[in-house]
Image: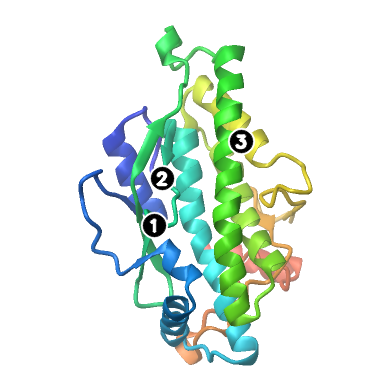
Amino acid sequence: MVLYSGNDREEMVALLESSFVTSIRGADDSSTYAFAASDLLHDEKRDLILHQQAIQQGLDQGGTGSVAVGTLFAKRYSVWVMAVISACSLYDTVLNIEDDVVRIELNGTGGMRYETRMERSLDNGSGLGIGENVAPTNEVLAQRRTEISMLRDRLQLHLGRIFQSVAAATGASIRVMNELVAHNVQQLFTRAIEDHAIWKTDKRLELIKYDAHVWLKESTDNTFFTRLQRFEHPEWQGPQLLIRRYCCLAYQVGSGSSAHGYCNTCPKLDSELRCRMLLKSDD
């Protein structure tokens, strides 16, 4: 992740592009991306998108291959979700998440790139004279909680509509799709809180932690909340790693030298194999 160094629009735009393949277009700019998120709610365009993804991934749109198309769609769409959350927690910026504003484009390998607009800014206390090294006031935090709660609920509705449509076309489980997103969101916050190079100032760290409590609030109607196991192994001294509750089926993608294999967070891996994979990736 690109390092955080202040509430700077240019830096935020660069981070979202490099870390989450999400571009920000101006209010008067038209998009060159082929599809809007709303297209996923219409059978014909949705099926076209999913069919193209299946071809790019080497998956059949039948049986288990079709299910993999659905689960991998959710996992990859979570990248855009992480962009929304990062803009909020690192740059106090709310991105537009309306179905007709969010645009997507396939990248040729089954993944997606995203595009949206900035919607508005969140108050981080600077207007009250609170500097980057001073903790935000209770007033600021209360307002922030209200705004992030509203954004979280709107985002859940957005994902709910799209995942229901994709599940209907692929046979994928909506519960699994939601869990894949929740895992990436929790891993995002885990890394942001652990890495001083990301938060840099005590105030920013406190805001990130506060936001995490809102996004991950324990509730039956919060799909971002889930209980995840942390990977522990005596030979692994790297960053904290959360294990997914469900496999995303990425191992079904490709064959031979282009085969994907298991992700290092996959629940199908045992502790020793996971550790070997992690240590090898660090070489």
227 displayed left or right of 237: right
Q: Is residue 279 visible to us here?
A: no
* Residue 172, quarter of the rendered image: bottom right
In the image, residue 279 above or below residue 66: above
**Given contact means CB atoms under 8 Å apart, are the residues at marks 3 and 1 in contact?**
no
The 10 Å Cα crowd at callout 3, few under 14, some 14 to 19, many 20 or more, is some
Residue 24 spot, x, y in % from top left: 30, 48
In the foreground, 173 or 208: 173
Residue receiving disc 1:
100
173 displayed left or right of 32: right
Q: Secondary structure at mark 1?
A: loop
**Residue ID at (44%, 63%):** 38
Residue receiving disc 2:
96
Q: Tag 1: residue type?
A: Asp
In the image, residue 143 above or below residue 177: above
Residue 247 spot, x, y in % from top left: 68, 72
Residue 156 spot, x, y in % from top left: 60, 51
33 displayed left or right of 215: left
> How many numbered marks are there?
3
How far apart in space, not on screen, are marks 2 and 3 (Cα)?
Answer: 15 Å
The first of marks 2 and 3 along the sequence is 2
Residue 21 spot, x, y in % from top left: 37, 57
Instruction: Single out the mark in the foreground, 3 or 1.
Output: 1
The 10 Å Cα crowd at callout 2, few under 14, some 14 to 19, many 20 or more, is some
Residue receiving disc 3:
149
Q: Is residue 207 visible to us here?
A: yes
101 displayed left or right of 41: left
**Residue ID at (75%, 70%):** 270
Q: Which numbered marker is on residue 75?
A: none
Q: Tag 2: residue type?
A: Asn
In the foreground, 246 or 171: 171
**Given contact means CB atoms under 8 Å apart, are the residues at marks 2 and 1 in contact?**
no
